[in-house]
C-alpha cells in the first residue's frame, strides 16, 4: 500500500512538473508574461541592480502599481511606478527619480505589472543560462545513460572473447518494455524536453541578446485650429458667438479667441502672432508660453486684440509711409518635442477695417506633419520558432526551464523505476535477464551428474556468462527453476524457500522458441 501511494504521488508530481514547464513556456512565448532584469538605481529601494521581476499583462492598471512599458525608439523596457493618468495615458515615475517619465504609454501598450520579485535573480538567471552551465546540465542528464551503455558494451565485449558470443544484455526495446507505462512515458518526455532545450539553447546562444535595427518612423503630428468671438445678439449671426470659419465683423467684436489642439509627442509650446502689411512691414508679437505639453492631446487658447494690432500697423505706416492694410495675421503655436523635432503650424487670418476673416478654406484650420524619419535603435534579437517570434532572452529562459524539467522528470523516473521492481523474485529475474533465459519443459535431474544449488541468481548468471551458456528455465507445481548445465555439473537456482517436489520420470528437454 505504501509503495502504491508513493508511486501515485510520484506520478502526480511528474504531471505537475510537466504542466508547469509547459505553462511557463507557453506564457513566455505568447507574450502574456515577461522577465525583466533590473539595471540602474531608479527603483531603489524596491528593486536593485540585478534583480529579476516577472511582469504579467492585466486588463486594467491602477495608480500605485509597478508596471513595465517599452521605451519609444530605444528597444528597452522601463519598470516604474504609476503615479497618475488613466488607460489613455499613464504617468510613470521611478521611486528614486526626481522627475516623471517623459513617455505616457496607454494601457494597451504596457508590457505588464510586476507580480513576482526575486532579489538578485537576474544575476542567477544569466549564470544558469550561460553556455557552460547549460552544457553541464546536458552532461548530467545524459551521463547516467551513457555510463550504463558503456558498462554494458564492455560486458558484451568481455563475454564475446570468453565463449560462443552470447550476449546477456537485453535489447533496448526490452528495457523500455519492462518499465511500467507511466515510467516509459516520463522517460520519453524527459528526452523530448532535453532535445527541445538543446535545440532552443543553440538558437538562443548563437547570437547576442540585442542587435541594431533600422526603423522608419512616420510622425502624425497634428494641430487643429478654431476661433470664436462674442458678438452679442444681432441680425449678422444666428447666435451671440461668431465661430470659425465665419468672419468676425469688427463693429460687433474687437477681441477674438483663437483655440488650438495639439496631437503629438510631449514637449513645450510657445505661441506668437506674425503681422505683415502689403508694403513689406513685418512684426512678431509673443502671445503665450512657453508651456509644457504632456500629450497626447494639448488644448490652448490665445486672445487677439484687433484694435491693438491695427494700431501697431497704423503706427508703423505713419513712420514708413507704407500702407497699413489689409493686415495679415499668422497665429503660430511653436512646439519643440522631447526628441528635438520642431512643429510650427500657422493659422492665417486677414484683418481689414470691416472684418477679421480666415485666409483660405476650412481645410486650413488643420495642419499636419507626416514626415518619415529613419532611426537606428538597439532592439532585442528575435527568434522564429515554428512561426512564433520570441526574444533571445526568452528563448534562453525556455531552454533552461526545459533542461530543469528534463532533469526533474529524469530523477523522478530513476527513483520510481527502482521502487517499482516486482515483489516476486522470479518475475524480477525474468524481466532483468530476459535475453539470457530460455524457457523449456520441466527436465529431470540427469543420473550420475552432480547438482549444485547456488544461493543467488546473479551467481548463476555469472556462471552462464563464464561458460557462454544460456539459463534454462521452467515452472512446475508453482516452483520456478533456473539451471545452467556445464559438461559435468548442473548449477541450479530456485527463488524462495519451501520443499522441492520430486522430479518426474526422465524425459527429453524440449526447447520452446
Image (spheres, grey):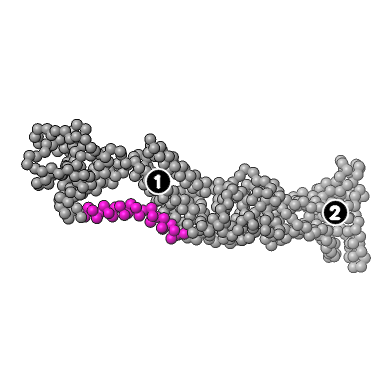
Whether 132 is among the magenta residues is yes
Q: Which residue is mark 1?
A: 412
**SS state under label 1:** helix
> Which corner quadrant holds the N terminus?
top left
Seen at 89% across and 46% down, the residue is 231
- In this rendering, the count of numbered labels is 2
For disc 2, the neighbor class at 10 Å (few under 14, some 14 to 19, many from 20) is: some
Horizontally, residue 100 falls left or right of residue 472, namely right
Whether 433 is among the magenta residues is no
Counting residues from the start of the chain, the first of labels 2 and 1 encountered is 2
Q: Nearer the viewer, residue 409 or 215?
A: 409
- Where residue 275 sits: x, y (%)? 84, 61
Horizontally, residue 338 falls left or right of residue 35, namely right
- Where residue 456 sits: x, y (%)? 22, 45
Seen at 80% across and 59% down, the residue is 289
> Which corner quadrant holds the C terminus?
top left
Horizontally, residue 136 falls left or right of residue 46, namely left
The residue stretch that appears in magenta: 129-157
Q: Is residue 37 visible?
A: no
Seen at 56% across and 60% down, the residue is 378
**Majority secondary structure in the magenta region:** helix
Proximity of marks 2 and 1: CB atoms separated by less than 8 Å: no
Q: Residue furthest left?
A: 448
- Where residue 2 sits: x, y (%)? 39, 37
Q: Which residue is mark 2?
A: 303
Residue 13 falls in which quadrant of the image?
Answer: top left
**SS state under label 2:** strand
Seen at 36% across and 53% down, the residue is 142
Amino acid at each position: 500500500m505504501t509503495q502504491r501511494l508513493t508511486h501515485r504521488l510520484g506520478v502526480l508530481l511528474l504531471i505537475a512538473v510537466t504542466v508547469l514547464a509547459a505553462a511557463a513556456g507557453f506564457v513566455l512565448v505568447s507574450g502574456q508574461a515577461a522577465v525583466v532584469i533590473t539595471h540602474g538605481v531608479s527603483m531603489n529601494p524596491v528593486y536593485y541592480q540585478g534583480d529579476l521581476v516577472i511582469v504579467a499583462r492585466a486588463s486594467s492598471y491602477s495608480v500605485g502599481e509597478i508596471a513595465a512599458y517599452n521605451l519609444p525608439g530605444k528597444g528597452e523596457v522601463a519598470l516604474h511606478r504609476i503615479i497618475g493618468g488613466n488607460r489613455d495615458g499613464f504617468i510613470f515615475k521611478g521611486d528614486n527619480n526626481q522627475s516623471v517619465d517623459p513617455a505616457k504609454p496607454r494601457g494597451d501598450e504596457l508590457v505588464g505589472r510586476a507580480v513576482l520579485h526575486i532579489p538578485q535573480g537576474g544575476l542567477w538567471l544569466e549564470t544558469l543560462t550561460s553556455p557552460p552551465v547549460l552544457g553541464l546540465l546536458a552532461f548530467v542528464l545524459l551521463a547516467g545513460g551513457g555510463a550504463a551503455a558503456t558498462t554494458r558494451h564492455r560486458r558484451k565485449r568481455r563475454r564475446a572473447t570468453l565463449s560462443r558470443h552470447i550476449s546477456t544484455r537485453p535489447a533496448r526495446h526490452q528495457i523500455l518494455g519492462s518499465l511500467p507505462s507511466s515510467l516509459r512515458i516520463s522517460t520519453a518526455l524527459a528526452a523530448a524536453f532535453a532535445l527541445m532545450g538543446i535545440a532552443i539553447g543553440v538558437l538562443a546562444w548563437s547570437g547576442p541578446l540585442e542587435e541594431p535595427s533600422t526603423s522608419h518612423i512616420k510622425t502624425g503630428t497634428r494641430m487643429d485650429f478654431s476661433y470664436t468671438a462674442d458678438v452679442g445678439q444681432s441680425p449678422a449671426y444666428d447666435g451671440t458667438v461668431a465661430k470659425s470659419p465665419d468672419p468676425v465683423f469688427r463693429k460687433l467684436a474687437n477681441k477674438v479667441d483663437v483655440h488650438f489642439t495639439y496631437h503629438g509627442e510631449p514637449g513645450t509650446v510657445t505661441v506668437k502672432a506674425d503681422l505683415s502689411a502689403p508694403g513689406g512691414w513685418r512684426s512678431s508679437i509673443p502671445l503665450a508660453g512657453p508651456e509644457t505639453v504632456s500629450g497626447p492631446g494639448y488644448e490652448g487658447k490665445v486672445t487677439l486684440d484687433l484694435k491693438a494690432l491695427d494700431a501697431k500697423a497704423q503706427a508703423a505706416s505713419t513712420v514708413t509711409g507704407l500702407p497699413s492694410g489689409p493686415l495679415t495675421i499668422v497665429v503660430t503655436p511653436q512646439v519643440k518635442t522631447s526628441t528635438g523635432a520642431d512643429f510650427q503650424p500657422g493659422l492665417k487670418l486677414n484683418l481689414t477695417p470691416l472684418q477679421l476673416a480666415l485666409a483660405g478654406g476650412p481645410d486650413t484650420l488643420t495642419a499636419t506633419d507626416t514626415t518619415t524619419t529613419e532611426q537606428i535603435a538597439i532592439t532585442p534579437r528575435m527568434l522564429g520558432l515554428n512561426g512564433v517570434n520570441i526574444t533571445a532572452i526568452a528563448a534562453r529562459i525556455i531552454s533552461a526551464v526545459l533542461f530543469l524539467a528534463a532533469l526533474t522528470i529524469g530523477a523522478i523516473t530513476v527513483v520510481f523505476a527502482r521502487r517499482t521492481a516486482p515483489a516476486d523474485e522470479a518475475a524480477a529475474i525474468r524481466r532483468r535477464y530476459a535475453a539470457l533465459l530460455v524457457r523449456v519443459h520441466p527436465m529431470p535431474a540427469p543420473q550420475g551428474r552432480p547438482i549444485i544449488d547456488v544461493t543467488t541468481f546473479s551467481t548463476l548468471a555469472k556462471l552462464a556468462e563464464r561458460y557462454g551458456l544460456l539459463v534454462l528455465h521452467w515452472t512446475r507445481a508453482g516452483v520456478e527453476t533456473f539451471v545452467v548445465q556445464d559438461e559435468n555439473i548442473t548449477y541450479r537456482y530456485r527463488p524462495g524457500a519451501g520443499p522441492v517436489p520430486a522430479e518426474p520420470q526422465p524425459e527429453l528437454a524440449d526447447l520452446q522458441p
